[in-house]
Image: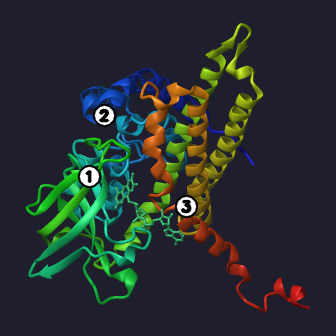
């Protein structure tokens, strides 16, 4: 098995790493002090530099203004960008826009693409994705209550959504609503494109998450659809196929999340190393001399390496066999990487002592914002159940070769 990557790609990653470290990381103190609003203008400057370098929207289609890089190359890029919470946004490849762009590219009509896709890829507008509802379990989305009723040539959408990431300031909302209530559960819902300023679409609030309501792209909104009327041509993909489209969105999307989390884990580990080496404990001793601190570092490196290899393998599998065939690998890494990130950030905070819980380092932001990694895109338990189901599948027949000898 060859783990090497091409010289071209390695050179590109080194260039990107230098750019991220010199141009994006220095914006973090402003983000930590004032949130996204405080840093948005600086980020626009950085985004223009990224465009100038020809790095903009690395994974998006070339014909719409992206660079068209393949999943594995893009995964490695995301690891570099994930070193800072502002990395992906700086390069026009942030969630939820990245997934929404993929949806529009795969399932949008020529009119949808003309109206939304180009502007989204170019980073002129942002979008959000509204599926989860406060009063129904997101883990079982067939229970969705938001309705889109047909009225002549329109859909009329009513319902309440929450945790629509980046809805604040977005131009487009892709909403998941029930269009076919009498169909089998997984054929009831559709995705519909709704301009964020459509009459009746109320931005109720940016939800406060662990004390921070956030703003702009770094926020999660509660939205109310009060009989929002859009033309039937706003349907994305076939009616009743919302869950099929959602699956398309989630496969590569989980690789994106995982690689970003690995980047963040690597950054936390770097901070842990630097602090361990620089924090003086006594005349001849720094934190790094202590075995318990060395243990934090070593355990983190072991877990990070294992999670990284598993994620790259899952990306490779998707590239070779498609997202459906890679279901098990995708579930494995979704749990493994989200948990690894949280353990490493937690250890990094511990090694920093009081400094770790302040907003003077990026660790507190990671601790707060990335706790949700174990909840969105499938909570840990949902993936664990799916993993177990797939593991047990070959053993489900009581007469199988494997169980027979045991029963004799
Ligand atoms: C920061 C953040 C950003 C988000 N962004 C978006 C977005 O942009 N758009 C969007 O539509 N949604 C978004 N979400 C919502 C997210 O998709 C849901 O939170 C997720 O699907 C879980 O749904 P729920 O919160 O309703 O939890 P529930 O479904 O109520 O589940 C609660 C808990 O129950 C447990 N559980 C669930 N199912 C099982 C099971 N089968 N077996 C055992 N235990 C189980 C898990 O521990 C789970 O965390 C976001 C959430 C967060 C926190």
Residue 302, numbered circle:
none
Would you call the spot at circle 3 few (<14 residues within 10 Å), some (14-19), or many (20 or more)?
A: many
Quick one: label 2 or label 1, which is nearer the N terminus? 2
Side of 314 relative to 160 (left or right): right
Report whether the residue tagged 3 is closer than 8 Å to ligand 1: yes
Q: Position of residue 209 (x, y in %)?
A: 35, 47
Nearest the eye: 198 or 381: 381
Is the residue under label 1 in contact with that under label 2 (CB below 8 Å)? no
Nearest the eye: 66 or 99: 99
Return the residue at label 1: 127
Q: Position of residue 361 (x, y in %)?
A: 46, 27
Return the residue at label 3: 380
- From the viewer's perspective, is residue 292 above or below residue 220? above
Q: Nearer the viewer, mark 2 or mark 1?
A: 2
Q: Is residue 232 visible?
A: no
Quick one: label 2 or label 3, which is nearer the N terminus? 2
Return the residue at label 2: 35
């Amino acid at each position: 098995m060859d783990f090497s990557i091409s010289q071209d790609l390695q050179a590109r990653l080194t260039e990107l790493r230098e750019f991220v470290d010199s141009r994006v990381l220095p914006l973090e103190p402003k983000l930590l002090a004032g949130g996204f609003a405080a840093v948005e203008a600086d980020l626009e400057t950085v985004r223009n530099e990224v465009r100038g370098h020809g790095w903009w929207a690395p994974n998006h289609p070339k014909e719409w203004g992206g660079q068209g890089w393949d999943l594995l190359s893009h995964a490695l890029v995301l690891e570099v960008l994930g070193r800072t919470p502002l990395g992906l946004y700086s390069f026009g490849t942030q969630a939820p826009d990245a997934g929404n762009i993929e949806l529009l590219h795969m399932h949008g009509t020529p009119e949808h693409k003309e109206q939304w896709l180009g502007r989204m890829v170019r980073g002129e507008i942002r979008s959000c994705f509204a599926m989860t509802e406060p009063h129904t379990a997101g883990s079982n989305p067939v229970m969705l209550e938001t309705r889109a009723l047909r009225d002549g040539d329109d859909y009329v959408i009513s319902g309440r959504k929450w945790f629509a990431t980046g809805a604040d300031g977005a131009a487009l909302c892709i909403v998941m609503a029930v269009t076919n209530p009498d169909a089998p559960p997984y054929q009831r819902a559709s995705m519909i494109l709704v301009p964020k300023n459509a009459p009746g679409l109320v931005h109720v609030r940016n939800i406060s998450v662990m004390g921070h309501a956030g703003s702009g792209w770094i926020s999660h909104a509660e939205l109310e659809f009060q009989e929002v009327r859009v033309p039937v041509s706003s349907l994305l993909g076939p009616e009743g196929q919302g869950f099929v489209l959602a699956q398309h969105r989630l496969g590569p999307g989980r690789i994106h999340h995982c690689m970003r989390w690995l980047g963040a884990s690597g950054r936390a580990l770097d901070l842990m190393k630097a602090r361990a080496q620089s924090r003086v404990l006594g005349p001849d001793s720094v934190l790094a001399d202590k075995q318990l601190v060395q243990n934090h570092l070593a355990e983190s490196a072991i877990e990070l390496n294992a999670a990284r290899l598993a994620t790259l393998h899952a990306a490779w599998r998707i590239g070779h066999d498609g997202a459906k065939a890679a279901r098990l690998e995708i579930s494995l890494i979704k749990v493994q990487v989200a948990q690894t990130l949280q353990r490493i950030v937690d250890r990094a905070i511990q090694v920093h002592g009081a400094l770790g819980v302040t907003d003077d380092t990026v660790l507190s932001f990671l601790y707060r914002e990335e706790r949700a990694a174990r909840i969105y895109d499938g909570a840990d338990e949902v993936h664990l159940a799916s993993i177990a189901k797939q593991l047990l599948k070959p053993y489900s027949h009581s007469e199988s070769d494997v169980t027979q000898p045991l029963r004799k």
